[in-house]
Image (cartoon, grey):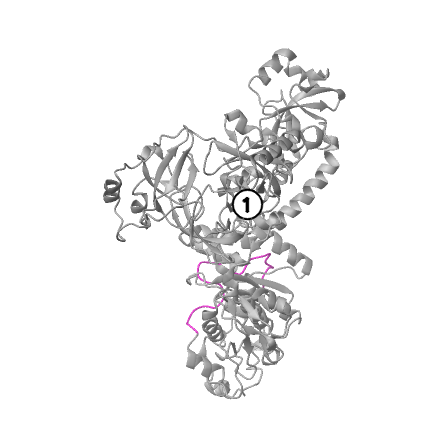
Amino acid sequence: FYLEDTGTTAAPHGSFKHVDTSLQNGFVPGMKLEVAVKSDHNTYWVATIITTCGQLLLLRYDGYGEDRKADFWCDIMTADLHAVGWCEQNKKILKVPEGIKDKISDQEEFLQQTLTGACSAPANLLEGLHKGKNPLDLIAPGSRLECQNTQDSLEAWIVKVVENVGGRLKLRYEGLDSDQADQWMFYLDPFLHQVGWATQQGYDLQPPAAIRSLKSEAEWQDVLTKVKEEEEESSIPANLFKDKPVIGVHSFTASMKLEAVDPVAPFVLSPATVVKVFNEKYFLVEIDDLRPECTTRRSYVCHVNSSGIFPVQWSLKNGLHLSPPPGYPGQDFDWADYLKQCGAEAAPQSCFPLLTSSHGFKENMKLEAVNPVDPGEICIATVTKVKESYLWLQLEGSKKPVPECIVSVESMNIFPVGWCETNGYQLRPPRRAIDGCINLVFFPTLSPHFRILSSRTVHERLKNQELNSTDAVVINGKYCCPKIYFNHRCFSGPYLNKGRIAELPQSVGPGNCVLVLKEVLTLLINAAYKPSRVLRELQLDEDAAWHGHGETLKAKYKGKSYRATVEVVRTADRVADFCRKTCIKLECCPNLFGPQMVLDKCSENCSVLTKTKYTHYYGKRKNKRIGRPPGGHSNLEVGMKKPNKKRKRRKHFFVCKKKRSSTSADNSPVGSPQGSAGEEEDDQDDLDEESMSEDSTSEQQDELLEELEVSEKKSMSSSPTQSELSHCLVQDQDKQKRKLRTFSFSDDENKPPSPKEIDGQALLLLTLPTVQECMDLKLGPAIKLCHHIERVKFAFYQQFADGGVAK
């Protein structure tokens, strides 16, 4: 809802590589394992993983080649699966299955050939306590890791996992009981390692200087001894870190100058210096500070792929501000003068990795990001600027205001929309909501905990009569619609039934603009003499410019259902104008409904109006045919069309004004059923309606048609209506894009996918990221679809997996 309210989109899930990696189950396509053969449970054969889905593996016995007919699914938890070599170690028999016996003449030669250079599935995920577990679940609270010192890369110390949130670990230095020095790191961070890594690299195992003084040297050694004694029960498998970025060799030397972003306060670009080179992999960067009284320096360890380091003049080339070092004389920083003043040289371009722009992030996209000032806080973030591989993020809802943050697109402190919800972590609500910039309504009479509600919630509760709208105080929100009043005394025009208008509620709202206006229009349609006619008047004209939000509205008339795309506005500042223009379109008083209540006398003096006088004053009608828009079809959706009887055309009551007697029209009394519009509508309307969308008179069929309309439009080629529509679309290819938009879909996001073959197996492999990216679905609908897929999937596996053994 927040994305819709703010008119923004979520950053693509595939842009967060570290999150994608964390979702893997440890098995990858191409891995080989040994699987029991169903026809003989005492024998096994080598199989290759085709794909994975949670704890399920799709396998194919080696020897079938590209033939997928014998592929079978296995549940890791229940199937008889083992790593390559298990049969030999346990004296089990490897035997070719019957289905490929005739394809393999020499079993030993075939096995040698198929296993040469092959990668075996990890044995620890197939046996013992870790069997079937997600690799991330192995990093449980109490597990231990080694963390490199951010000030000296040649030192490391033991850290204990306090909490694991989707691979984001809260770590505490071993030997400390309080959380004052806790830190958050993603498990793939290049400075996080398996216990024993420092010793293997020849590095010192020392607590960092910031906590070293809290214990004596002897006490720290006791901590180390205790860790080594418990190493086996708290260790984490080494293969969990196989996807960590590999650190390459750098070419920096001491005293080189560069531009850098301080990782502790990543808000500005500053001049910096390489002050120390540890070895071929690590070096120390320090943010320049020219003040003589400055005793604390901001420095941190870097490697060749570290984010936030740039060559000299990078900011200038990208039109960005470079903050002069504290103590620098003047505000206009010049690199040439500064290098000369310092007697230093700039780090050459070759020292830095190439930056890319192909990452999927764009301005105004939303994501979730760690607050660098308070790493335990994750906030909604908006991308305000994109420069090569770097994003400028504005955090929303942080406890304390934070400037725009500069982060790399490969940062492990940014996450896709919905990540916190998926992993059960608190996401900070946006402060903008509290400031009234989005749809909020204040109810003073409610309990303090529920005084401020989103307009969407208010809208639903008002409909269910759970709230009293008279108690509401609308906070001035951009997307929050005020109350819309139905002014029953105003002229209701030729289309709307005066009696039904009088039965409408006094007002609708406040709430979300789209929802409130959709409800208002629905009430008006239902209050019409002929709901289908009003729906046609409201439908979006295919030649009109698209300025708002498309909503699909329905109308029922004489047992038939009609649908059309109607444009509504999204922001509060356009509501009054929208209501007035809609009234004029329906030839009723401009004040019939809107944010202003008419108490006694209408400002339009509509009590003197009749049908012809109204048309004369407002001149809404143009001399054009009413019904199908030009181009051969309406944007009202087309269903099965019944055979039409040829009927005599009659003159249109409201269009052909010159052929009607003005006297008879003027004598129509105000407040009457307005000329019996329900009877006076000409037969042309009936003809037009029969060419518009007609659903089955059965409610059940109506709903089915609604869900399957996309497939019907492709399959019902024999329908005369569909043939006619297809012919018209071919003729008008220059307008095809807009017509598709207005024909049956409210916007581009809902357009039907291109026809592709999707078999049962492919359906079962759909995941949330795949559904979102390939089907352009928002998070809510995508989650619902995946939920249904999961139910189908597990029902299928329960019936056919049969312990994971191939048939």
| 719 left or right of 400 in image | right
Residue 631, magenta (yes or no): yes
Residue 45 position within the rendered picture, expressed as x and y whole percent measured from the top left: 68, 20
Would residue 470 be seen by someone viewing this image from the given angle?
yes
Q: Amino acid at mark 1?
A: Ala
Residue 97 position within the rendered picture, expressed as x and y whole percent measured from the top left: 70, 19
Residue 579, magenta (yes or no): no
**Dot 1: within a 10 Å radius of its alpha carbon, few (fewer than 14), some, or many (20 or more) residues?**
few
Residue 760 position within the rendered picture, expressed as x and y whole percent measured from the top left: 64, 38
Q: Nearer the viewer, residue 128 or 565?
A: 128
Give the main secondary structure of the magenta stretch. loop
- Residue underneath mark 1: 181
The C terminus: image quadrant: top right
Residue 242 position within the rendered picture, expressed as x and y whole percent measured from the top left: 55, 30
SS for dot 1: loop
Is residue 562 shown above or below 198? below
The quadrant in which residue 96 appears is: top right
The N terminus: image quadrant: bottom right
Question: Which residue does the image show at 62% across and 35% down from the upper left?
Answer: 135
Is residue 98 shown above or below 447? above
Q: Which residues are magenta?
A: 621-645
Would residue 634 be seen by someone viewing this image from the given angle?
no
Q: Nearer the viewer, residue 150 or 446?
A: 150
Q: Nearer the viewer, residue 679 or 168?
A: 168
Q: Nearer the viewer, residue 225 or 70?
A: 225
Counting every numbered tag in the picture gives 1
Is residue 126 shown above or below 510? above
Question: Which residue does the image show at 41% across and 62% down from the upper left?
Answer: 545
